[in-house]
Structure formats: C-alpha cells, structure tokens
Image (cartoon, helix red, strand yellow):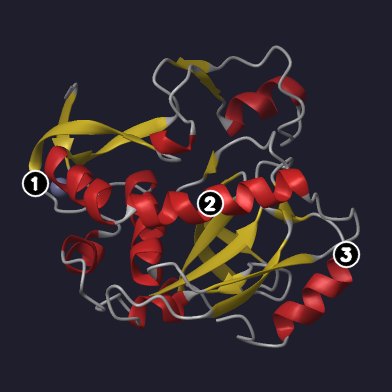
Amino acid sequence: MPEKSDRCHVCGREGPLSFEHIPPRSMGNNQGARSYRGVDIIKRAGVFDASAKDGVRFTKMRRGIGVQALCGSCNSYFGTHYVREYTGCMRELGAHFVQHPPADDAPSIHLSGGNVNVLAFFKHAVSNFCSTTPYGTMLDCREFLLDKESNDFPSRYRLYMFAVPDSDSVMITTGWMVLYYANGGSVTLAHVATFPVGFTLVDVDASDFIPPYLGCDITPMASRKWGDCPEFALDLPLMTLDKMLPVPRAGKEGARERNEGGPACA
Ligand SMILES: [Zn+2]
C-alpha cells in the first residue's frame, strides 16, 4: 500500500513510493523488527558498537526491515527479475554458515557455484544501494536496472562483496560516506550488509584511495549476459558488523594479503 509521495530513486518519477524489504521478505524479513540508528547508539553508549544496544531507542518496523524509495513499478520489476536469484543464493550461504560455522581465525570463506544468474544477482545488490542512498545520487543506474539485459553499469562504480557469518548481525545501510585516510587519500563508499553477506559500493570518480578489506570485487559480473550462470569461485572475507561498519572479523593479516593480490576473486 503506497504511503508516501516522493521521487523514485531509480526512475526519478514523482509519485507514491512502495515499501521494499531489505533483505527480501522471502528471506524471513516479514516479522516485527527493530531498526537502530547508529547515531542513537553513539548517543547512548558513547561508542559505535551494535552490541551496545541496551536502552537505545529504536523504530519498531511492523512489516520487517525496509525502506520506501522505489515506485511500485520499479519495485515490482526488481521483484520479478532479480530477487529470486538473490534469495536462492543467500539461503544456501546462510544455511552453510549455520551448519558449518567458520573457524574463529578463518579470514575468508570459499564460495563456488554455477547455477546463479549472476547479472540478476548483481542488479539486486545495486538496487539496494539506490534505495539506501539519497535521491538523485544514483540515477545513472536507471537504464542498467530497468532493462534486465543491459550491461551498461556506470564506470564510476565498483561493487565489493563480503561474508557476514554471524546470524545475529544487525542490518547496516550507511548511505554514501567519505572516509579519510592517514595517507591523505579519501574514498566515497556506501555499505549494505546483514547476515549472511554484505556489499560495499565505491564511487571511484569521487575517491583517490581504495582501501584494502573491502571484499571481493564483483564488478565484472555486470558484464555478464542476462541468464548466464558461469562457474564462479569467490574468496569472501569474513566481516563482523558489531562496529556498525563492516570490519574484518579475524585473521586481518590474511585478509590483507588476499585482498592485495588483486582481482583473484572475480
Ligand atoms: Zn521508479
């Protein structure tokens, strides 16, 4: 049921926006959920730590976690073409983590397969960033997302993926952030993450330093043909979301070596 009138973050049209579940409703995101804002946790606990939620105010989200950023037409196009590929893959990975929890010092998990429409999977992840960044900042993804066969992913973005093995992880959507580094460089990025995976989208044109630990660069998936289910092998670094940002969970040195090796996992 439309409840809010504004501009759709993907097509730019003005009109009622529909409620979009992130993660998808079919992954169990349909119950009452608590949504915390990082700023409220800091005010209460003094630290940016998701395990310090006692007494922090929250919004009770009756229908599950989600946002209102897409018009009904975009939302239903994505639901029809992208969501199923995504949830199939995530369910498998989630079950794997529950049945075979990774060792505490494991830096990454090896994920391989060959039955995923990788372009659909990729587009679902990108659509989540459109929904969780401010209106107008990603309208250049419109053609790419609204024509399922399009490979025209704007070259200013790179998309990274990582694994979140803790099933109690909170949902993190940061919108665009600029991080400054001691070397004088900065990176403009956004995160969307929860159990069992997260993504980091980097705006390369607005960055002059790409830090390690972002995860596997899966941008090449954007060039795959619609319906292609190539054999893939990804070494996904394991991250924790306890600090309200993705942080390597363990084996930092190992993660660093792997990530600096280049696009070994795309
Ligand atoms: Zn729209």
Total marks shown come to: 3
Q: Nearer the viewer, mark 1 or mark 2?
A: 2
**Position of residue 263 measured from the top left corner of the image (x, y, whole percent):** 60, 85
Q: Which one is in front, 232 or 20?
A: 232
Q: Amino acid at mark 3?
A: Gly
Q: Which residue is mark 3?
A: 251
Q: Which residue is mark 2?
A: 90
Q: Are marks 1 and 2 in contact (CB under 8 Å)?
A: no
Residue at position x 18%, y 22% in the image: 1
Q: Is residue 180 above or below residue 266?
A: above
Question: Considering the numbered disc 3 on the image, is that residue within a helix, a strand or a loop?
Answer: loop
Q: Is residue 91 above or below residue 17?
A: below
Q: Which residue is mark 1?
A: 13
Q: Are marks 2 and 3 in contact (CB under 8 Å)?
A: no
Could you say which disc has been placed on residue 220 in the image?
none
Q: Nearer the viewer, mark 2 or mark 3?
A: 2
Residue at position x 44%, y 81% in the image: 220
- Looking at the image, is mark 1 or mark 2 earlier in the sequence? 1
